C-alpha cells in the first residue's frame, strides 16, 4: 500500500467525480502537511499513469486517512461509509505553508472540472447500476444476469450508431430535448420534446442513405407511433420494425422507454410499459431493458453514493477504468482499446454479509458474527435478571423497605427476619448491599455483582408510560452498586398515537415529565426516545439507538427484560456492529448512503 496526500478540495473532486488527476511530483509528499491533510491509502497497482500525471479512481482507494476532527465531514457531507475511513490524531490545517512561509497551491489539472470528467462520471453511474442489477438478480434470474454481463462487456464493440447516441446524450448533460412549436397544440410535455429529439436523431443518423422516398416515408411514419402526447399503443410498431432500425432496435427502443418512463401511464389511457414489452420478440426484450436502465442511470446522482463491498471492489475499479477508456483515451471508436472484462462474484452469502458490515461499520470482517435469533437471545440470557433467570434471584434488605422485588427476598427487622421464597425447586442466590449476619444458610453475593463489569449501557422499554418492578429493581441495583460501569441509560417509550399528536406541545411535555421521573429514579442522566407502534418502519428508531450505543458491542448492553421482545432485540443488533442477523431481503452487495 502507498499513501498519497491530497487537500480537501481534491478529495471532493475524487469523491464526487469518482476520479482525481494530479501531477506525478505529488507522490514525493511523504507526510500530512499544509492543506494536504488527507492521505489516500491505495495499492500501487490501482494507480494509472498518464505522462507526467497520476490518475486515481475512487474504487481503487483502500482507505481515506483523515484527522479525527474531520470524521463528521466525511460521513455526513461526503457520504463515505465508515469502513473507508481511517482516523488519525492530527491537527487539521486550513492554510498550507511551504518552506519559505508562503501559501502553496494544489496541483490539480483542470480536467477534473471539464465536461470529459462529467461524461466519465455519467458512464460510471450507468455501469454501476447495470452491474448492481445483475448481482441482485443472479440468484432468481441467473440467465438474465449473465446476459446483462454480456451486454456490459460488449461496450468495446459498440456500433457507430450506439456510440453517437450515447455521446450525444452525454454532451447534452441530460435527456436531450428538441423544442418545436406545433400548430393548434397549446401544450407539449417534456417527453414530447424528448421524443422529437429522438426521432430527429434517428432520421439524421440512420435514414440519410440507402432509402427511396417511399421507404423514407415508411420509416418516419413508424416513428410517429411513439408520440407520447397522442399515445395509443406501440404494440404493432414494435412487431413491425423497419429494416433501417433493425440492427440498433434494442438501444433505439431502450432509449425511447427511458423517455416514456417520465410519463404518467394510467390504465385508462395507456398500456403499461410491461404489457407492451411482453409482446416483444424475446430476442430483443432483455437488451431493451438493459439500454433503458443504462440511459436512466446516466444522470442519477444517488448512484454516486453506492459503494461496493470488498468482494466486488475490483469489478467496480475495472468498470471505472472502462469508463475512463471510453471517455478519455479514444474519441475514435475504431481505435478504442480492449476493455477490462467484468464478472459476477461467486462468494457465499456469509462472505457478502461480513464484507457489507465491514464497510458499513468500519470493522474487520472477522469481527462480524452472523448469528441466529436464538444465539442473540443467549447473549441477553447471560444476564442474571433476564427471562427465567429471575426465578433464582433474591434480595436481602437489612432495613425496612417497601421494595419487595420479584418473589424471593429476605427482610431483616431488628433481631428478626422474614423469608419469602417462591422458588422451591432450584437454589436461589440472594444479593445484599453489605454482609450481615443471618440465622439461616443461603447462597449470597454482593449486589454489585448482578450487573457484570463489562456492561456499559442499560437499555429498557416502557409501554404506556408506566414503570414496573423490574425498572425499579435496576434503579435499586445501580444505587447500591459501588463499581458499576453503566455510562448510558436509554429507554424507548412505546406509544400508540396519531402522527400529529407526536409533534404537539402536550406530548412533548408528557415526554419531559417521564424523562425527569426516570432521572430522579436512577439519579443520573437518562435518554428517552419515542417509538410510535402505529408506524411499522423501524429505521428511525434504529438510527436513534445506533447514535447512542453504536460504538458498543451487544454483550456490553444490559437489557431490562420488560416489554423486550424479538423486535427490540433486532433494534439492538442493527444498532451495534459485532453481530448481524441475515435478512434474505437485504442487498449485501453494496452499501448506499444516498438516503
Image (cartoon, helix red, strand yellow):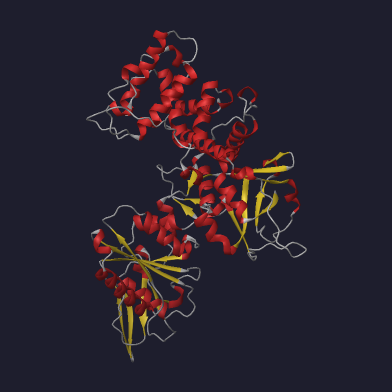
Residue at image coords 53%, 25%? 164
Q: Quadrant of residue 43?
A: top right
Could you tell me if residue 260 is visible in this image?
Answer: no
Residue closest to the far right: 100
Viewer-nearest residue: 183 or 302:
183
Is 500 on the left or on the right of 143, as rendered?
A: left
Is 360 on the left or on the right of 19, as rendered?
A: left
Tell how many labels: 0
Residue 539 position (above or below residue 425)? above
Could you tell me if residue 193 is visible in this image?
Answer: yes
Is 315 on the left or on the right of 178, as rendered?
A: right
Is 270 on the left or on the right of 375, as rendered?
A: left
Residue at image coords 36%, 32%? 191
Viewer-nearest residue: 505 or 468:
505
Residue 193 position (above or below residue 526)? above
Q: Position of residue 82 (x, y in %)?
A: 54, 54
Q: Position of residue 499 (x, y in %)?
A: 26, 59
Q: Position of residue 512 (x, y in %)?
A: 31, 73
Viewer-nearest residue: 535 or 578:
535
Residue 143 position (above or below residue 397)? above
Residue closest to the far left: 268
Residue at image coords 57%, 44%? 18
Q: Quadrant of residue 570?
A: bottom left
Residue at image coords 51%, 44%? 304
Viewer-nearest residue: 400 or 87:
87
Q: Position of residue 158 (x, y in %)?
A: 55, 23
Amino acid at each position: 500500500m502507498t499513501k498519497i496526500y491530497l487537500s480537501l478540495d481534491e478529495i471532493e473532486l475524487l469523491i464526487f467525480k469518482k476520479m482525481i488527476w494530479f501531477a506525478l511530483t505529488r507522490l514525493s509528499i511523504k507526510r500530512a502537511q499544509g492543506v494536504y491533510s488527507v492521505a489516500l491509502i491505495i495499492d500501487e497497482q490501482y494507480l494509472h499513469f498518464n505522462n507526467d500525471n497520476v490518475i486515481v479512481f475512487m474504487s481503487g482507494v483502500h482507505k481515506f486517512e483523515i484527522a479525527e476532527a474531520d470524521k463528521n465531514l466525511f460521513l455526513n457531507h461526503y457520504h463515505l461509509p465508515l469502513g473507508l475511513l481511517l482516523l488519525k490524531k492530527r491537527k487539521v490545517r486550513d492554510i498550507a505553508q511551504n518552506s519559505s512561509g508562503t501559501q502553496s497551491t494544489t496541483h490539480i489539472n483542470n480536467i477534473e472540472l471539464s465536461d470529459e470528467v462529467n461524461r466519465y462520471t455519467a458512464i460510471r453511474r450507468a455501469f454501476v447500476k447495470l452491474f448492481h442489477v445483475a448481482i441482485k438478480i443472479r440468484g432468481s434470474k441467473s440467465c438474465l444476469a449473465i446476459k446483462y454481463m454480456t451486454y456490459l462487456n460488449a461496450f468495446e464493440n459498440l456500433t457507430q450508431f450506439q456510440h453517437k447516441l450515447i455521446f450525444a446524450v452525454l454532451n447534452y448533460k441530460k435527456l436531450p430535448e428538441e423544442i418545436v412549436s406545433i400548430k393548434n397544440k397549446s401544450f407539449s410535455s417534456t417527453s414530447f420534446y424528448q421524443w422529437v429529439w429522438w426521432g430527429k436523431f434517428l432520421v439524421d443518423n440512420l435514414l440519410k442513405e440507402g432509402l427511396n422516398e417511399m421507404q423514407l416515408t415508411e420509416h418516419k411514419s413508424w416513428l410517429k407511433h411513439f408520440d407520447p402526447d397522442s399515445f395509443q399503443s406501440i404494440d404493432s410498431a414494435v412487431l413491425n420494425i423497419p429494416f433501417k432500425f433493425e440492427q440498433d432496435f434494442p438501444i433505439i427502443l431502450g432509449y425511447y422507454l427511458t423517455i416514456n418512463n417520465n410519463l404518467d401511464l394510467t390504465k385508462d389511457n395507456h398500456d403499461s410499459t410491461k404489457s407492451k414489452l411482453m409482446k416483444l420478440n424475446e430476442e430483443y426484450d432483455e437488451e431493451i431493458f438493459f439500454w433503458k436502465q443504462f440511459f436512466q442511470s446516466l444522470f442519477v446522482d444517488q448512484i454516486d453514493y453506492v459503494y461496493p463491498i470488498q468482494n466486488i471492489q475490483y469489478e467496480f475499479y475495472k468498470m471505472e477504468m472502462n469508463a475512463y477508456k471510453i471517455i478519455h483515451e479514444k474519441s475514435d471508436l475504431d481505435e478504442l482499446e480492449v476493455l477490462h472484462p467484468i464478472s459476477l462474484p461467486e462468494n457465499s452469502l456469509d462472505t457478502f454479509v461480513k464484507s457489507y458490515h465491514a464497510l458499513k461499520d468500519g470493522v474487520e470482517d472477522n469481527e462480524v458474527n452472523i448469528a441466529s435469533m436464538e444465539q442473540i437471545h443467549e447473549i441477553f440470557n447471560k444476564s442474571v435478571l433476564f427471562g427465567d433467570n429471575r426465578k433464582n434471584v433474591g434480595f436481602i434488605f437489612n432495613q425496612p423497605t417497601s421494595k419487595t422485588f420479584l418473589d424471593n427476598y429476605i427482610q431483616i427487622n431488628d433481631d428478626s427476619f422474614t423469608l419469602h421464597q417462591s422458588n422451591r425447586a432450584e437454589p436461589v442466590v440472594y444479593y445484599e448491599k453489605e454482609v450481615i449476619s443471618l440465622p439461616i444458610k443461603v447462597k449470597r453475593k454482593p449486589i454489585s455483582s448482578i450487573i457484570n463489569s463489562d456492561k456499559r449501557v442499560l437499555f429498557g422499554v416502557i409501554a404506556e408510560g408506566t414503570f414496573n418492578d423490574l425498572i425499579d429493581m435496576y434503579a435499586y441495583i445501580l444505587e447500591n452498586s459501588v463499581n458499576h460501569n453503566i455510562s448510558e441509560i436509554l429507554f424507548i417509550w412505546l406509544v400508540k398515537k396519531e402522527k400529529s399528536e407526536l409533534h404537539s406541545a402536550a406530548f412533548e411535555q408528557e415526554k419531559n415529565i417521564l424523562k425527569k421521573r426516570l432521572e430522579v429514579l436512577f439519579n443520573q442522566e437518562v435518554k428517552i426516545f419515542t417509538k410510535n407502534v402505529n408506524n411499522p418502519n423501524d429505521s428511525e428508531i434504529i438510527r436513534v439507538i445506533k447514535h447512542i450505543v453504536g460504538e458498543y458491542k451487544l454483550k456490553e448492553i444490559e437489557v431490562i427484560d420488560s416489554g423486550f421482545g424479538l423486535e427490540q432485540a433486532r433494534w439492538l443488533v442493527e444498532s451495534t456492529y459485532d453481530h448481524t442477523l441475515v435478512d434474505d431481503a437485504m442487498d449485501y452487495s453494496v452499501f448506499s448512503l444516498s438516503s
